[in-house]
Image (cartoon, helix red, strand yellow):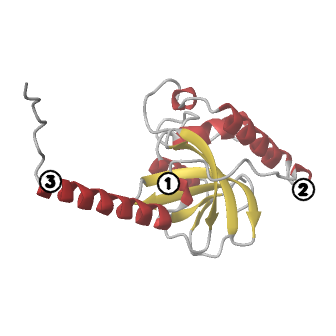
Amino acid sequence: MNASRPPRRPRGLLVGLAVLTTVLVVLAVLVFRVAPSRYLPWDTADFPDVDTSALTLPQARIVELLEDEHRTQRPGTFYSEGAEEPWCANFVSWIMREADRPLANPHSGHWRIPGVYTLQEYYESVGRFEPAGDGYRPAVGDVVLYENELWVGQHTNIVVAVDGDTATTVGGNELGRIRVHTVDVTSDSAVVGFGRLG
């Protein structure tokens, strides 16, 4: 009785798969080494220990809300009134409303501003937008506005701590989660500007 042999795979196919796998691994390593932490698929930091005694009442409330939401990790639809859409700006809008610092959509007047461009429009319309590169140093409760075509396009999050040129921020819709990371406010080319808390 002859046992049938499995078909042999061409040697060239195996070599090609090995080369392709190696190239993909090298590319992944390069991407993760050069990508700002806010674009990586894991939480890069625990929520920071913030001394709220040195903050104003609105700033302290924002930090408290951000810490609660970071711990709870609700779905994006919670912040966007049920809408299935990118929700980083909705998250910012919800936090500000809950902190008694509601925003007003310049197109509808509604508290929720679902887009980063519209969020910038709002801050410009109320005279609280500070462009990046003008020397402004953000404070706790300020909103960071990003634009980076290469990685994720528009994005926004909220400052919870500042140490020199480094701001610790919390953002929603970062790979489907609420995440903490740091940003160098003087050198990160993706930062468009800041929306001042007050």
Gap between marks 3 and 2 measured at Cα:
64 Å
Residue at the image point whose x is 51% and y is 27% from the top: 77
Residue 120 in percent (x, y) is at 52, 54
Q: Nearer the viewer, residue 31 or 140?
A: 31
Sequence-first tag of 1 and 2: 1
| Relative to 27, 116 lies left or right | right
| Relative to 184, 23 lies left or right | left
As helix, strand or loop, the secondary structure at mark 2 comes to: helix
Residue at the image point whose x is 87% and y is 53% from the top: 51
As helix, strand or loop, the secondary structure at mark 3 comes to: helix
Amino acid on which disc 1 is placed: Tyr
Relative vertical location of residue 163 with respect to residue 117 in this rendering, above or below? below
The circle drawn on residue 54 is 2
Sequence-first tag of 3 and 1: 3
Gap between marks 1 and 2 measured at Cα:
31 Å
Which residue bears the numbered disc 1? 39
Residue 161 in percent (x, y) is at 75, 58
The answer to whether the residues at label 3 and label 1 have Cβ atoms under 8 Å apart is no
Q: Nearer the viewer, mark 3 or mark 2?
A: 3
Residue at the image point whose x is 55% and y is 55% from the top: 38
The answer to whether the residues at label 3 and label 2 have Cβ atoms under 8 Å apart is no
Asked if residue 65 shows in the view, the reply is: yes
Q: Residue furthest front?
A: 1
